[in-house]
Image (spheres, rainbow, N blue to C red):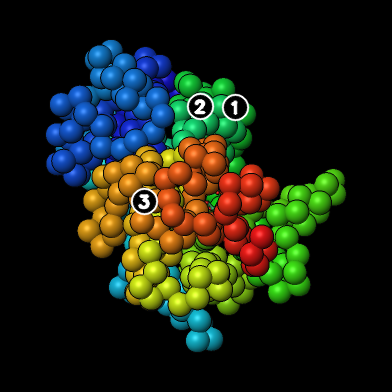
Amino acid sequence: MKFEKICVLGLGYIGLPTASTFATHGIKVVGVDVNPHVVETLRNGGLHIHEPGLRTLVRAALESGNLVISDRPEEADAFIIAVPTPFYHDRRGEINGRPYKLADMRAVESAAHAIVPYLRRGNLVVLESTSPPRTTVDLVAPILETSGLKAGADFHLVYSPERVLPGQILRELIENARVIGGVTPESAQAGADLYACFVTGEIRQTDATTAEMVKLMENTYRDVNIAIANEFARLAERFGVDVWEAIRLANLHPRVSILNPGPGVGGHCISVDPWFLVETAPDLTHLIHTARQVNDSQPDFVVRLVERALGSPAGRRIAALGLAYKPDVDDLRESPAIEVVLKLQQAGAHVTCYEPFKPNADLPELTLAPTLESALQDAEALLLLVRHTTFTELKASQVATWTPARLAIDTVNGWKVAEWQAAGFRLFRLGVGKLQ
Ligand code: SAJ
């Protein structure tokens, strides 16, 4: 199938890079967002999100004339839905007394409804948003079929998950393998034809529900792997073992690859997607549910670590280093670091935070310092929460000149014990649990 014009609904972390990449590969793209601020910002040459290389890409797409920004769809050969699928904050399911989160699919529903007036025979519709299994066939197809056209017969319908890593989106969008799940083999072929326009990774065709499962399995596998690393960290502290050393040694085994413990799992993917499986089959997802609970409780574990290192946090002055959900990104969504800080504040600590990627973040509940030096100047203890390169490359001897603190609590194995000891610091590390 040939594509001259497509419409991308949702211009966030996935939709905007996707729309821009199609545009720079010669396809006319209408990028649609329902948020007037997003439309306005992009039309004025601005950017509402941060991702390395994105500014240049969006500019090239707009300047080529192939990308236009709009608040509503238009007739096109293909429609791509790339809207958020968060979970409800005010609604919960429950199984055997254990609560679980519920997916909020309203943005997908309204994007599908928005396509209906423009849907024509022979069109392709792609859902990219991470969704519970069967969403394409049970939720999206029936909405699109209110047009009078039948999915798989009159128009093609596929699910194709995005799998890009924040921080490396532009490269991974092109190079990663792409899974295309069609409601019919012909739909899958149409989807494969579309992405072949820029994807250099392998393109594999399957059915829509398998493609949905694949996406959820990938992120769930990672969540469970991190949960076991976090549980290993707790065990290591109990047994007087250094978990980082133990994991390094275990990973020498050719069939073992344990991920890293830390202050918890954040972001809008790994901490969200496993719930889509729990919600749709709560009776079959005991392990997945438990892994989520382990990772969600990790900020509490860090607070207890701080208490063991410092005594009661009440009245203590702590400098928290890093607020992003993971290293070397500016994204603060669902960040465990922020949760740790809020919990310490609730326990009475005075926490000054420094986030190098967003020193002026709009976080009214937190105290943010504009520079690292100012965050450290009155601190009694340093608390490393994110393994940003700027933090791991700090010279301990230099830090010692900026702060009266001589205690450093490291939750991400970012600092070398010998170097910090030589600079006069004692280190208290997560997964070790004693002064070093
Ligand atoms: N984390 C750990 N320990 C680790 C690795 C990560 O605690 O060893 C934490 C991070 O600090 C962060 C969270 O997990 O808080 C998630 O970070 P991440 O880098 O594992 O993943 P995301 O959420 O940035 O991106 C994931 C990726 N999925 C997989 O690697 C299977 C990405 O490819 C997906 O496209 C993305 O989710 C998504 O959009 O679904």
Q: Looking at numbered disc 3 in the image, what kind of residue is underneath it?
A: Gln
Left or right of 166? Residue 11 is: left
Q: Residues within 10 Å of mark 2 (few under 14, many from 20)?
A: few
Q: Which residue is mark 2?
A: 171
Which of the labelled discs sits on residue 377, or is there none? 3
* Disc 3 from disc 1: Cα separation: 49 Å
Left or right of 417? Residue 297 is: left
Which of the labelled discs sits on residue 269, or is there none? none
**Of callouts 3 and 1, which one flags the residue occurring earlier in the amino acid sequence?**
1
Residues at marks 1 and 2 touching, judged by CB atoms closer than 8 Å: no
Q: Which residue is mark 1?
A: 201
Is ligand 1 less than 8 Å from the beta carbon at label 3?
A: no
Residue at left 73%, top 60%? 242
Circle nearer the viewer, 3 or 1: 3
Image height check: is 175 above or below 211?
above
* Residue placed furthest toward the right: 253
- Number of numbered labels in the structure image: 3
Image height check: is 55 above or below 382?
above
Secondary structure, mark 1, is loop
**Of callouts 2 and 3, which one flags the residue occurring earlier in the amino acid sequence?**
2
Q: Looking at numbered disc 2 in the image, what kind of residue is underneath it?
A: Arg
Circle nearer the viewer, 1 or 2: 2
Quarter of the view holding residue 30: top left
Quarter of the view holding residue 61: top left
Quarter of the view holding residue 309: bottom right
**Of callouts 1 and 2, which one flags the residue occurring earlier in the amino acid sequence?**
2
